Amino acid sequence: MTRRQNNGTEPNLEGRVVIEDVAPGVDGGLWPAKRIQGETVHVFADVFSDGHDTIDADLLWRAPTGAWSRTPMRLVENDRWTGGFKAKELGDHVFAIEAWRDPFATWAADVEKKRRAGRDVALEISEGTDLLAQTQDENGRRLHAHVAALGAAHVAQALEILLAEDTRALMRASGPRDGVSRSADFPLRAEPALAGFSSWYEMFPRSAANDPSRHGRFQDVIARLDDIRAAGFDVLYFPPIHPIGRTNRKGRNNALTAGPDDPGSVYAIGDSSGGHEAVHPELGTLEGFRALVGEARARGLEIALDFAIQCSPDHPWIAQHPDWFSWRANGSIRFAENPPKTYEDIVNVRFDGPALPAAWRAWRDVVAFWIAQGVRIFRVDNPHTKPLPFWRWLIGEINRAHPDAIFLSEAFTRPKMMKRLAKIGFQQSYTYFTWRNTKREIIDYILELEGPMSEYFRPNFFVNTPDINPFYLQTSGRPGFIVRATLAATLSTNWGLYSGFELCEAAALPGREEYLHSEKYELRARDFNTPKSIMPHISRLNAIRRAHRALRTRGPTLFLNAWHDDVLAFARLAPDRSEAILVMVNLNPHHRRECAYEAPLWEFGLPDHAAVEVDDLLHGGRFRLHGKTHQIALDPQRNPVIVWRLLNPAGGGRP
């Protein structure tokens, strides 16, 4: 009689080979890990079994199109195995690990030990020949017949054949496998290059005329494209470009009453001329917008649009689909609120009840409409105030049809919500960088972003936005703007700024992180050619980013000893260790700081007394650093930051 196990199943050896702690994996494979198209995906797992038998493993993967492929994994150390595949296609990939006990490899290891010990291995040769007979390969069968024919008279020759590398390779491919285990399937999403490395410039097209008395047009934006591209930006982002409602239109500085010439908030979307699929008549026509997209793309710039799911009280959908909106008990429409704030020029949108599924499909179709006009990048306004299942569905729908589409999450909210939005599909995310100012705050935040979050959360370090005029910049003067741009451009592969940052605009509403004379409510004219502009510094940062792989590849950041609380020092290393980009920043925009710091010679395998060549990437010139410890003085008015390139004397290639 067969004795049953306590769990009610028949006794079996399932799971004898253990596969666990698979990486990359987000929440155990619940959500896709993220990589960039063309990137090699390095997979790791713990693989082990009982006893001393030899274990082997394969990495299996499947691209969005095509069948499963496999490649051997290799043992790193301590039962940790690794393998890799290239994510050549955009879209959703799947990978898994298959592992087994290898009878032939176990036999080969044992027989070699016995031979070295001087023992008779004639019987072992017979056993190895029997294993060879179990191969399903025609070459294996022929090889088995040859070895068997040698017989006991040619032990040495038979052993040489059985232990040959060709024989081992043949047996690994088609020989017997015991206790085969397979992991769960793990999802991985390969996304466009711009999802992983980009520099964003945000501007209001309606201010592009640089004349406060004239509404800008798409043609005025085209006139600025060469300068924006020359500054090294590759994404030009517009807040909403749709018609603006008249009801409860906001005046300057968010006044509740608008003057006759006030243009209103671009986020109060929709009037009688159209809604989210229309362009503001004073900006131009849809044909003019398509021409702008074409002109931008010809210069290497992609246009990003704001996708703001909110409507003015004049939006056509309110009359056409009243059940898509929220209404109060007295029959009035419910305005958007964030108590105690009320946004009288915006009304709430529903995602449940009678709005499901028609409203969901309508919002998806809005995105598809702009994709048809040539847009591939969308900055999503306040996604954390809409249902997570909606975003997962919408982004999934769009990315299945357009895997090159990118969604940036503008969610300055609770950490867990920000993380979840990234998991369900957003390719980039706004971050708390805007409010991380001290040395300890910055180090801790970067280490957090480069930890487990790095598998799915791709940060975009915006230094300011039309909604956020950081307190640090309000009081820092020009040095603070240089500091924040340098940090954002070198600590993150994605960064951005809102127009006016390059001019060090910082006038604020008293006691608030909001701009005085906010462009959200009025046209702005700017002198972009003023010698006060820091655009030359920003342009140089973008050029450095493009030229050095260490800054194009995400993390890890090596924080260095710099013995002053106001001086932040860190290095980003090229993957082959051929160079290190060394950045030092005086975080205090008002006072000169001097301290000792360490150059990361050890990363090049150099002793503390060695010397390295250094290129000054901001100001030009080359010099030598002798030894590990040095002094630096950073003066806010002269040189608040340095960006150096340290060259590995060995030329790189250190593992």
Image (cartoon, grey):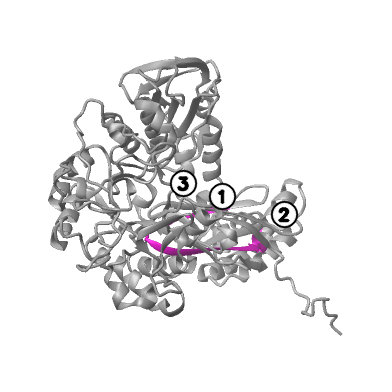
Q: In which quarter of the view is residue 341 placed? A: bottom left
Mark 1 lies on residue: 452
Q: First in sequence: mark 1 or mark 3?
A: 3
Q: Is residue 122 left or right of residue 375?
A: right
Task: Single out the residue that lies furthest toward the bottom.
Answer: 1
Tag 3 near tag 2, CB within 8 Å: no
Camera-side residue of 53 and 171: 53
Mark 2 lies on residue: 110
Magenta residue check for 322: no
Tag 2 near tag 1, CB within 8 Å: no
Q: Nearer the viewer, mark 3 or mark 2?
A: 3
Residue 137 lies, with reference to residue 125, above or below; the image says: below
Camera-side residue of 374 and 26: 374
Magenta residue check for 103: yes
Mark 1: few, some, or many residues within 10 Å (few <14, many ≥20)?
Answer: some
Q: In which quarter of the view is residue 67 placed? A: bottom left
- Give the residues in magenta: 82-105
